[in-house]
Amino acid sequence: MTALRVFIVDDEPLARLRLRGLVDAIHEPRCEVVAEAATGSQAAAWLREHGCDLVLLDVQMPGADGLQLAESLAGRAAAGHGVPLIVFVTAHAMHALRAFELDAVDYLTKPVRRERLQAALARVAQRLTHRAAATALLPPDAPVAPDADFITLTDRGRLRRVPVSEVLYFRAELKYVTLRTASESHVMDGALSELEQRLGERFLRIHRNALVARWAVRELERHAPTIFGDADATDIAEAGDGWAVRIVHVDEWLAVSRRQVAAVREALAGQNR
């Protein structure tokens, strides 16, 4: 992967200098500081003319603060514009919840430790890799979900936002739903029917227990019947046909119900047009 293009925004010159030094000292992932700004308005002006992968963003600054800048970027993302990812770097822990509501990748408190910054940069690199892979596998005419389109869940007591563009599938198991990306699995509350209605045509219901991203479906084959742990008579009848789809990146096979085989075939045919 090419070096991450990093934009540092902080009103304190010494803080910017120290943060630049920490970024330069990290060799994995490789990073390059492409610009600095001292205020939110300066940063917004620079971002209108230039691109970067990541903004290391202070919260409290003169004039427009970091949260306001992040809100404006979230608005641009919701409109379908490409925007950089954000990691907040601040002396104040009180704004963490709002930061994650704005889809920040991480929230670092000063003084920042090198190991903590490196972990945040690694998450940024991972998200960019997944985003690029998902975009590359989409059909040319497929609508691409903006970065602000995400699933909110709680992971080990921490609020997480997973971009819908990274989700491979949702699978209902007992009282919970498993969300699967290329690198992680998350357990969340909710119902597949609600997710199906919200996500629309981007996802395909392949089984009463599974909702799959259309771009992530790669093969349909006859397989040994798969029975989920909470199967009832309907599940057993559906599994009798033994159809399954292969999911990209994780190379997993998910059962397809008899009534959904035609829809899966149609989705695969659409990818080849």
Image: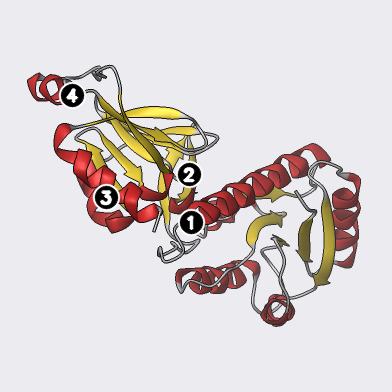
42 left or right, relative to 254: right
Which is more N-terminal, label 3 or label 4? 4
Residue at mark 3: 266
State the residue at coordinates (24%, 18%): 225
Residue at mark 4: 241
Q: Where is residue 167 in the image (x, y as percent from the top left)?
A: 44, 45
Asked whether disc 2 touches disc 1, contact meaning CB atoms under 8 Å apart, the reply is yes
Relative height, residue 184 to residue 197 (above, below): above
106 left or right, relative to 273: right
Where on the picture, by quarter, is residue 143? bottom left
Q: Which of marks 2 and 3 is in front?
A: 3
Q: How far apart are marks 4 and 3 (CA)?
A: 18 Å
> In which quadrant of the rendered image does the C terminus lie?
bottom left
Most foreground residue, 14 or 234:
234
141 left or right, relative to 228: right
Q: How far apart are marks 4 and 2 (CA)?
A: 40 Å
Amino acid on which the number 1 mark rests in the picture: Glu
